[in-house]
Image: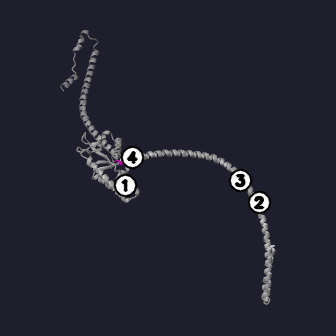
Amino acid sequence: MIEVAIIVILVLILCVQLYLVFAKKDGSNNSELRRDISTELKNTREEINNVLGARIDNLTQVNEAKLENIRKSVEDRLTHIEKENSIKLEKMRETVDEKLTSTLEKRLGESFKQVSDQLQSVYKGLGEMQTLANGVGDLKKVLTNVKARGTWGEVQLSALLEQFLTPEQYSANVKIKKRSNDFVEFAIKIPSKVEGEIVLLPVDSKYPVEDYERLLKAEDDGDVAQIERARKDLEKSIKVFAGQIRDKYIDPPYTTDFGIMFLPTESLYCEVLRNTSLCQTLQQEYHISVTGPTTFSALINSLQMGFRTLAVQKQTSEVWNILGKVKTEFGKFGLLLDKTNRKLEEVSNTMKLASAKTRNIQNKLNKVQALPTKDDDILDTITYTTPLDSGDEGDQEE
């Protein structure tokens, strides 16, 4: 039907073109033809619209019927698939639930056990942290007390001395100056060149904790002005301590011309050592050497080497004295050997002479067959004068 309508439309268009061609030839009938054609075209368009509308409605109804059938088929199929999938999913869910339940229970059990163990470790760590916090608090209380702080540094210094020196090589709480009541914490005994005398090396521990803590706080805050101020305060405290050691404990020739300031922490010692001008000032003006736990151990080792060197020197002098005595005795021993050698030569000559005499007598006795008995006493009256007898007389004269 649609094809027929299209053919009709093409025919009409052809007719219109023919009309236009003839219209050019006949201008008088142009108006009437236009009206007729217009009317025909209008009627044709209405018929076409009616035909097309009916056809479209019919196609629409047919398509709707087909779509409805398709929809019903799809719905039925989807319903069937959904039921099958539901059954399969239910079976899968049951299987997965069983496996998940067993696995989950196992994993949860292991996880709870691990969590329990970790919580126990955490509780234990918290207890240790609490103990450590209490210890830190106690240590802070100790360090804020000047007397206790000094005792802490003294104990640390005593431990180092006990570790590297014997009790005879140092003394504790020594009164250096006779007219002073000040006692230095420790004094290392250094052997003197004079036999039986010693020189004391004063060692005192100092710990300016307040100035050092202010410096650390300023560094944490990043305040440059406060850092400089804290460093100047720390330098001032170190100089004050150095002056106290110099004035109270250095007294040559009973002591060395310098003393040792022991700082109980490496961080404080490094902070002081970083200030080069301060170290030079302490050594040149105050005659004080600053040490920390590590450098103090090295200092003690160097002192031990000095002790050993001095002992070797003393032993060397003793060895030289012994060698001198040995040399003298060895000279006497040489003279004695010479004298003994002469005696041995005299004895050897005497033995040779006696041997010759014996052979001579033996030769003579071989010619004698027998001797009368009454003449046996003749041999008793025979005396021999030998060089041995003359040698003995020579020794008596000597």
Q: CA distance from mark 3 to mark 4?
A: 72 Å
Q: Residue at x 26, y 23 (%)?
A: 351
Q: Position of residue 50 (x, y in %)?
A: 80, 75
Q: Residue at x 32, y 50 (%)?
A: 290
Give the answer, above or below, for where 261 lies relative to 75. above
Q: Are marks 3 and 1 in contact (CB under 8 Å)?
A: no
**Front disc: 3 or 1:** 3
Q: Residues within 10 Å of mark 4 (few under 14, many from 20)?
A: some
Residue 73, quarter of the rendered image: bottom right
Q: Of 98 and 353, which appears nearest the observer?
A: 98
Residue 363, quarter of the rendered image: top left
Give the answer, above or below, for where 106 lies relative to 34. above
Q: Is residue 141 magenta?
A: yes
Residue identified by numbered label 1: 215
| Label 1 element class | helix
Q: Quadrant of the N terminus?
A: bottom right
| Mark 3 vs 4, N-terminal side | 3
Q: Position of residue 151 (x, y in %)?
A: 34, 44
Q: Which span is picked out in magenta?
A: 140-145
| Mark 2 vs 1, N-terminal side | 2
Residue identified by numbered label 4: 139
| Label 3 element class | helix
Q: Position of residue 221 (x, y in %)?
A: 40, 57
